[in-house]
Amino acid sequence: MTLPVFEPWNDPEAKPLIEFQNVTKRFGDFTAIDDLTIGIYEREFFALLGPSGCGKTTLMRMLAGFETPTEGKIFLSGQDMAPVPPNKRAVNMMFQSYALFPHLSIWDNIAFGLKREGQSKGEIETRVSDMLRLTRLEKFARRKPHQISGGQRQRVALARSLAKAPKLLLLDEPLGALDKKLRQDTQFELMDIQEKTGTTFVIVTHDQEEAMTVASRVAVMDNGKIIQVATPADIYEAPNSTYVADFIGDVNLIEGTATPTDEDTYALHWREGAEPLTVKTATTFSDGQTAHLAIRPEKVTISAERPEDADNAVQGKILDIAYLGNISTYHVELPSGAVIKAQAANTRRIARRSYTWEDTVWLSWTATAGVLLAD
Amino acid sequence: MNRMSWFNTVSLSLGFAFLYIPMIILVIFSFNESKLVTVWAGFSTKWYGELMQNEAFLNAAWVTIKVAVFSSTIATVLGTMAAYVLVRGGRFFGRTLFSGMIYAPLVMPEVITGLSLLLLFIGIGLDRGVFTIVLAHTTFAMCYVSVVVSSRLVTFDKSLEEAALDLGCSPAEAFRLVTLPIIAPAVISGWLLAFTLSLDDLVIASFTSGPAATTLPIKIFSAVRLGVSPEINALSTIMIAIVTVGVITASLVTKHQMVRQKRDEQAAART
């Protein structure tokens, strides 16, 4: 039995819940969003990832209605959102600062949006207690926001934004204020809640691990443009540019000129006198075109002897070892002075580690281990 | 606690002596039996009794309170609105000019404010009385209120208002249900400030008051010109007492709130 795969973005029939059409947003001379077009589908957990100032928060605030696009259109369920004010949108937002109302109890904070809708007292009570149960806050209903801990406040903010059962929930760096352990727990909680409620989530984050963990698709942004939109696995394994490869995780980038040798196979001449590297790729490069090989450290094997059947192998000297407990990252300096990082699991105790500083080692990887990128 | 050095002791005594000796003398002499203000003739509360009989003083006190309540309330509404626009209105044409102009009356000599208001009232043919004093006091108290309220609004987290809009409030509802309750302490202290300013204003009130309405400070000032009477001492002592009680109550309330909030936060940290 195969489970149906959730990937509406590959289904030409599917209609996106949110559509940005050539949206541009300028603040004075500064262009925050630059001619952006994208579709986000129902039930997606969509992450906007990028460095600060890349426009991801502006994008989110336009969805909430706090900013209006300078050019272009935003559609929610096919309806143009431009004339709809924030209080009339079926969109709720969880703020980075949580923005809990300090003068109201937790219960009243969650009930706030429902009361504005003019629901009956009974309906409000049922809905608020559902939300309290969902976020495990029943015990704190009568407290004020300053009487609970940071993690609890974060859950109140989530409960409040979910209470009105919005079509779309926006999360602005929701876990930024939590410490790492709590953040990881909360990430799984968020995914759980997203699945239970079936709400479409759009999350803004600068934490790539967070984006990879929670999202069904990740959009990597830079300077107001979306560089790549793909599933976390594709973003990691098949980045479309050196920017994305470099932004997500750790990567070795080797620059050289590509020469086609076979169908899908290229030789990358990367250094005078060195053996060219063999790379398989679906993208086409012209003869002599400058290209970058992006290869993840964990895909580089480290060994004392030259492996017999490796597609690519280079020799170097260990410059540095970063010991992270479960794994170690070896910084290996090649004769040219370039440094390549290789990761290996620490399957043995540290005292019996195979390689140490100044050791001469071989690094090897297969032809398909890396990606060849034009820029 | 460390014992204070003699230098600190002297500085402290000097400072407080400077501030409070005149008032202490005034309070002591309000209980003087003698009609002569500077000669002590034994303890008595008779001047307080006489004060209660003095129709003119009681009338002036009533006018003063009416003026203070009305002008400080109007000034609070207008001042809060001005502060809100200045802090939240974003960039609009003439914003810098407007924000500069709202603070100008703070440094304007009162005589000028008073005189210009007088000219205006005469110009538009408004009879001087309680109404004109209320208008005048509103004018100058409003900028104090807007200073107090805007300093609170600057530190106010804007995302709270956005959250209210996001949850379905119209901008007016967001102000009423979220902003106002949170900035209420600043609005109240703005009101108290306006009330106090109106209560003890002499200069502007003397320009804008008419024969029908005299405020207490004007009354005291004109009475003193005919010679200080022990009744004035008694009246001043009552005013000092009211102000003292008010200040102490306000500070106790604030302190109590802070202590409670701190305790709550510590309790939260433990859970």
Image: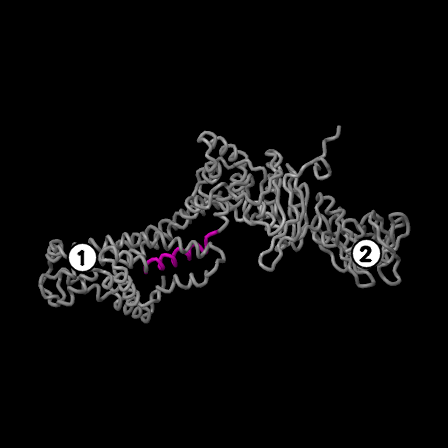
- Tell me if I can see residue A110 in this picture: yes
Q: Chain of mark 2?
A: A
Amino acid type shown at disc 2: Ala
> Which residues are the magenta region?
B140-157
Residue lying at 28% horizontally and 67% vertically, measured from the top left: B111
Give, as a three-letter code, the residue at label 1: Ala
Label 1 CA crowd tier, 10 Å (few <14, some 14–19, many 20+): few
Give the side of residue A226 with respect to residue B73, left or right. right
Q: Position of residue B186 (x, y in %)?
A: 38, 53
B142 inside magenta stretch: yes
Q: Is residue B231 left or right of residue A287?
A: left
Looking at the image, which residue sits at the far front?
B124
Q: Position of residue A71 (x, y in %)?
A: 62, 51
Front position among marks 2 and 1: 1
- Residue B71 to residue A85: above or below: below
Disc 1 sits on a residue from what chain?
B
* Residue B270 visible in the picture: no
Classify 10 Å Cα crowding around label 2: few (below 14), some (14-19), many (20 and above). Answer: many
Mark 2 sits on what residue?
A291
Q: Which mark is residue B212?
A: 1
Q: Position of residue A43 (x, y in %)?
A: 64, 36
